Structure formats: structure tokens, C-alpha cells
Amino acid sequence: MELWEICFRCWRPRRGWRRLSESLGAASRLVCNFCLPRLRVVDMKASRTIQIAAIAIVMLISFSGCEGKMFLGPLAIKRDGGRLLVAVCSSVTAVEITGDERHAGMFEHWQSFWTATGHISVVRGDIFATATPIAGLNATLAKSPRMGPGDAIDIAVRPSSEADSRYLHAVFQLNSSKLSESVWLHPDGKTTESPCASS
């Protein structure tokens, strides 16, 4: 559950704090302790507009605090028609590659669209396509990613050993246009003609 969702559940006037504390874990209760004092300043009998504005402010704080810590890969992505191309810019033995997408919009959630599990040696510069079988991995494409304006894409490559520090994870924020088919997008927002040019 994301931070803004927890805050929203804390704020809902029909759900009491005692009941909420029973249904959420300790970490979520800490979040509620942070949210509630700030949300109590809003009169629950105030207009719906004021209430929505309060939720929006909390969500803005949540997003800026959590997602400001950008995951930098090293990975790069590009579009090939309806397929998403993922370039891995570090050599690693991987057991899982996952892809999640969040569409543009205030109340959108992360949704998994691609999971590939197994055992594969990835060499720096290898490129995978979401709609193409990968030797050594059992890939499942739940749906084709939209890759539209304002969407966000999360790609993670999990190494075979938990002790391996080469856990590759990147979040890509798309701008006002679709994901490009001509250049590679990096998690810091830069684009290059070569997928691993900036790593």
C-alpha cells in the first residue's frame, strides 16, 4: 500500500482510528501518526472541495518524499511498436526481471505487466523485449504496457544471490509524449542513441 493510500484511509471520517490500527501493520500506523495531525486541521463538515484539496496536498508530499529517491539502474528503455525494449547496462546473473507501469493520473496504482523468472547470465548491453521469449527465463506478459505521456515504468532485475549488490532497479518517468522509438530513455531523464552510453 502506498503512503498516500494509507493517509487517505486514516483520513476517512467513517473509519475510526481504533479500527484502522487493527487492520494495518505497525509501519502503516506510523504513517497514520504522521498523517492524522495534519489532516485533523480540515473540518470534516467542510465542503468536498476542501477535503479533496487536503488529500491532494498529502499525496503531493508522499510522492515527492518517496519517489524523489530515483532508482538509477543502470537500465534503459525504448519502444518498438507495441513492445517495450529493456537494455541492461551491467553484467549480472539474474533470476527475475519484472516490469510495472503506472498510468498518468493522481489516483493511479502500479500494475505489473511483465514477469520473467528462471536463471540467465546477462551481459552488459543485452536487450530484452517484453513480447519476445527469453532463453533461460519463463516470461509472462500480462498485458502490453501503454508507454503513454505522463506514465511511469518500473523495471527490476534481481540477481541470483541475495548477497549480490548488483540488484538493478530503475524508474522511468515519461514526459508529455509517448516513449520514444528512436532514442533510449534513462531513469535520470536523459536520452541517448546507444542504450548504455551514459552508464
Image (cartoon, helix red, strand yellow):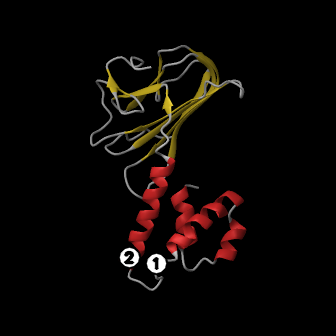
Q: Are marks 1 and 2 in contact (CB under 8 Å)?
A: yes
- Residue 137's x, y, as percent? 61, 24
Question: Relative to 123, does residue 75 appear above or below in the rendering?
Answer: below
From the viewer's side, name the closer residue of 160 and 63.
63
The residue carrying mark 1 is 42
Q: Residues within 10 Å of mark 1 (few under 14, many from 20)?
A: some
Q: Quadrant of residue 193?
A: top left
From the viewer's side, name the closer residue of 147 and 143.
147
The quadrant the C terminus occupies is top left
Residue at x-position 34% and y-position 29%: 190
- Residue 23's x, y, as percent? 69, 67
Residue at x-position 54% and y-position 13%: 123
Which structural element holds mark 1?
loop
The dot on residue 54 is: none
From the viewer's side, name the closer residue of 134 and 169.
169
Q: Quadrant of residue 45?
A: bottom left
- Residue 107 can be seen in this image: no
Real-space CA distance between mark 1 and mark 2, rounded to the nearest whole angstrom: 8 Å
Residue that protrudes farthest toward the bottom in the picture: 45
The residue carrying mark 2 is 50
- Tally of marks: 2
The quadrant the N terminus occupies is bottom right
- Residue 76's x, y, as percent? 43, 26
Which residue type does callout 2 highlight?
Answer: Ile
Question: Relative to 21, does residue 123 appear above or below in the rendering?
Answer: above
First in sequence, mark 1 or 2: give its number: 1
Question: Relative to 100, does residue 92 appear above or below in the rendering?
Answer: above
Q: Residues within 10 Å of mark 2 (few under 14, many from 20)?
A: some
Residue at x-position 51% and y-position 48%: 66
Which residue type does callout 1 highlight?
Answer: Val
Question: Relative to 160, does residue 41 appear above or below in the rendering?
Answer: below
**Horizontally, is 93 left or right of 124 in the view?**
right
